[in-house]
Structure formats: structure tokens, C-alpha cells
Image (tube, rainbow, N blue to C red):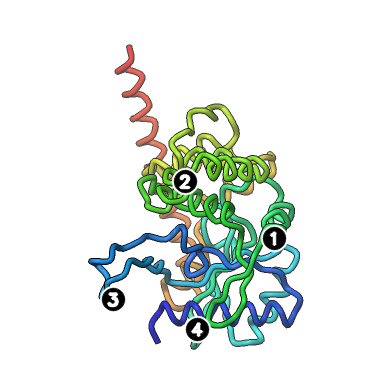
Amino acid sequence: MPTSVSIRFTHAALQAIAEDNDIDLLHIKGPTVDERLLAVVSAGDQLCGAPGTVARQSVDADVLVRPAHVDRLFEVMHRHGWTTAYHFADGSAFEHAATLTHPVLSPADVHRRFPGIGIDASTAFERLWAERHTVPIAGTPCPVPSLRAQRLLLIVHAARGGALDHSDIQRSWHFGTEEERAAVQQLADDLGAEVALAAGTGRLEEYHGMRGYELWKALSTNERSHVRIWVARVRSEATVVGALRTAIRLILPNPRRLHTTLGRRPTAREMARAYAQRARWGLGEVAQLVRSTSLGRRGRR
């Protein structure tokens, strides 16, 4: 089965599960994106001789779930043959998505929040849910975010990956009208996503000094120093407890990912070796950061 077809069936299957179990979820990215935000090919490039849109390429099905319904969704998915490959804490530093796999369908990325949105995840979901509409995917009506919400999510997603020249940003922001950009900005302000949006649209310096500025500058410019990203990620946390938890989690090795790499549960010796490797890596990164900072200060004298 082609991946693009399998992903559509995955979206449809997840929607069927959601409806049968009173679970609210929004289908995002991939085949759910509005046609007005897709690339267009000219008539000369089409075999049929007519202009058309280019389908997005994905490797999994992405859904954003009402946070209060996440545990229920996992329970039901497991009953239907899904296996959790990576938990929230095993993924990015944002701990925003878990990956589940199925013997027949494509993998599913279950999001409990969307990186870049700063307000409470439940409040943010309710805000996006209020503007939803449905689109048919594999013959199944699936709730998706509004057009302006899709624009925002695509821009922020591209910025997080350091792809500031991505066509998603071009079509979602630069090719939009003044009214469309204002609508996206208003939604970003409501969701606490204004810094992330600014990072993706070339206006980040307007938010210099705000919480999240350092992090989104590092992410959107493809910062290579893990230590710089680590520092920026810790400083972006709203609470001391959150900052400490993030600081520790980003330093420690991830047992589940090590399990995946080895194909089995790591032994105590292998975990100890992983801790030692992380420690050496951290010391090396810090030393490099100190050297670069010292050289930079000397150059300004």
C-alpha cells in the first residue's frame, strides 16, 4: 500500500476510534492541509493538461488531541492493535507528541500540545476546536483546524525545524493578504504563539527579551550547539520546577531510545556507559561554548 494511502486510512481509523469513544481530536498537517496552502503546478507540468495542487508528503498521521482525552485515546488504540513506540518524554524537548505504530496502518503522532503555543494546552485546544471544520479523508469526515490556524501551525512547525525558506511559510504568510496575516497574528496572540510566529516570519527581533525569544532564535536559525539550545530551552520554561525538570531531562540518556537502538532492554552496564558518554559530550560542548564566547569577547575589544 502506498504510504500516502496508508496515512489517509490511519487518519480515518483514528477518527472512527475517536467518535466511538467520545474523544476530541483535530487532524493536522499531511493530507488535512487546506488546498489553498498547497503548492500548485502549472498546466504544462500536469499530464492531464490542467493546473493542480501537489499533495503533501508525510511519513505518519498527525493528530492533536484534547489533553484530557489523551489517556483514553491511548487505551483504545492499544486495544485496536497499536503499540507505543515513543512516549511524550522520548521525543523532542517539548515532550509534545507520542508515536504509536500499527502492524497494518501508518504510524501515528499523537500530539497533546503544539510547540510554540504558550498558553495552557487544554485552553489552546478548546480555542482551536471552536474554529474547526471537517474535511473528508479516506471517505471519513475528519475535524481539522480553521484555515488561519493551519497557517499558524505550518509556520511555527517550519520555524522549529529551522526551515525559514520553507514553502509553507511562503504560502501561509508571505503570499497571504494583509487581512489573512492579521487574522493569523490575532490567533497567535490569543494562543501565546506570537514569538514562534515572529521567528517564522522574520520579525523575531521585535520580541527581543521576551520569554521564548532565545529558544526560537536558536531553533529557527538551526543552532548547532546543543548546549546553547539546552540553555535556551531551560530559560523558556515558565516555572523554576519546569526549568529544573527540562534541564535534567535534556542531559540524561533516554532509556527507551536506547532500547530501540539495541533492539532490547539495555543492561545496567550499557546505561552506565550511556551516562558516561552523555557526561563527556556535555563537558565537550560546554568547553566549546566557553571558548567561542571568549574569542567573541576578545574580538570586540
Question: Image quarter for residue 74?
Answer: bottom right
Image position, residue 254 (x, y; %): 51, 62
Which secondary structure lies at badge 1?
Answer: helix
Specify which label sits upstream in the sequence, 4 or 2: 4
Alpha-carbon span between mark 1 and mark 2: 23 Å
Q: Which residue bears the numbered disc 2?
A: 176
Question: Label 1 crowding class (10 Å Cα cut-off): few <14, some 14-19, many 20+?
Answer: many
The reply to whether the C-beta atoms of the residues labelled 4 and 2 are less than 8 Å apart is no
Residue 289 disc label:
none
Looking at the rendered structure, the kind of residue marked 4 is: Leu
> Is 179 in front, or is 245?
179
CB under 8 Å between callouts 3 and 1? no
Residue, x 61% and y 60% (percent of image)? 145
Q: Which of marks 3 and 1 is nearer the N terminus?
A: 3
Horizontal placement of 21 versus 205: left or right?
A: right
Q: Which of 276 and 134 is in front in this view?
A: 134
Which is more toward the observer, 291 or 48? 48
Q: Position of residue 128 (x, y in %)?
A: 67, 56
Label drawn at residue 105: 4
* Residue type beneath disc 2: Gly
Q: How far apart in space, not on screen, are marks 3 and 1 (Cα)?
A: 38 Å
Are dots 3 and 2 in contact, CB under 8 Å?
Answer: no
